């Protein structure tokens, strides 16, 4: 059974490292396939995101892909909302979180199907 958790971490890490949002796959793997509670799966996803994002940030800074001008205008509200969201998630029912995350994935899939995404 432990190997399934390791495999889920590898898949989430690879997708996260490629910038594809490993949590989009990691959370359903943990909740649906491995019967982990929604709050726990979200915690695992967020905890694993920290080292992945630090590695990605280091590579992006090294390759001069980070624009520091105006960065605080994005970082400060993001941190505040992340803290607020975590307090809401802790108090929320796991079924509600599962439904909201499932709805998010449906919207994300629909946007991808109609050609949405980053355009240059």
Image (cartoon, grey):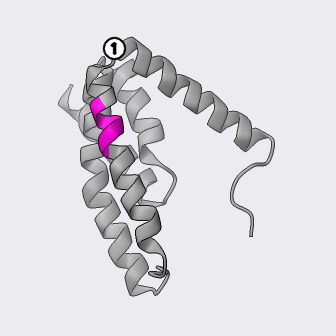
Q: Position of residue 42 (x, y in %)?
A: 32, 33
Q: Quadrant of residue 78?
A: bottom left
Q: Position of residue 62 (x, y in %)?
A: 38, 86
Q: Residues within 10 Å of mark 1 (few under 14, many from 20)?
A: few
Instruction: Report the front residue among 14 and 23.
Output: 23
Q: Look at the picture and state if 71 lies above or below 38.
A: below
Question: Which region is colored magenta?
Answer: 83-87
Q: Position of residue 50 (x, y in %)?
A: 27, 55
60 relative position to 39: left or right: right
- Could one spot residue 100 in this view of the protein? yes
At 21% from the left and 25% from the top, the residue drawn is 1
Q: Quadrant of residue 105?
A: top right
Q: Which residue is mark 1?
A: 93
Instruction: Report the front residue among 116 and 90.
Output: 90
At 39% from the left and 32% from the top, the residue drawn is 27
User: Would residue 84 be counted in the magenta stretch?
Assistant: yes
Instruction: Report the front residue among 80 and 31.
Output: 80
- Name the dominant secondary structure of the magenta segment: helix
Can you name the residue that lies furthest to the left here? 2
- Could one spot residue 4 in this view of the protein? no
Q: Look at the picture and state if 60 lies above or below 27.
A: below
Which quadrant holds the C terminus?
bottom right
Q: Quadrant of residue 95?
A: top left
100 relative position to 118: left or right: left
Q: Look at the picture and state if 48 lies above or below 73.
A: above
Q: Position of residue 2 (x, y in %)?
A: 18, 31
At 46% from the left and 87% from the top, the residue drawn is 64
| SS for dot 1 | loop
């Amino acid at each position: 059974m432990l190997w399934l958790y390791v495999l889920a971490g590898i898949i989430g890490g690879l997708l996260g490292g490629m910038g594809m949002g490993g949590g989009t796959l990691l959370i359903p793997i943990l909740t649906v396939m491995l019967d982990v509670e929604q709050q726990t799966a979200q915690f695992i996803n967020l905890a694993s995101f920290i080292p992945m994002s630090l590695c990605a940030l280091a590579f992006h800074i090294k390759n001069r892909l980070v624009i520091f001008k105006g960065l605080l205008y994005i970082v400060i509200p993001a941190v505040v909302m992340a803290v607020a969201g975590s307090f809401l998630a802790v108090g929320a029912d796991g079924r509600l979180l599962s439904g909201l995350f499932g709805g998010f994935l449906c919207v994300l899939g629909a946007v991808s199907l109609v050609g949405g995404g980053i355009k240059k």
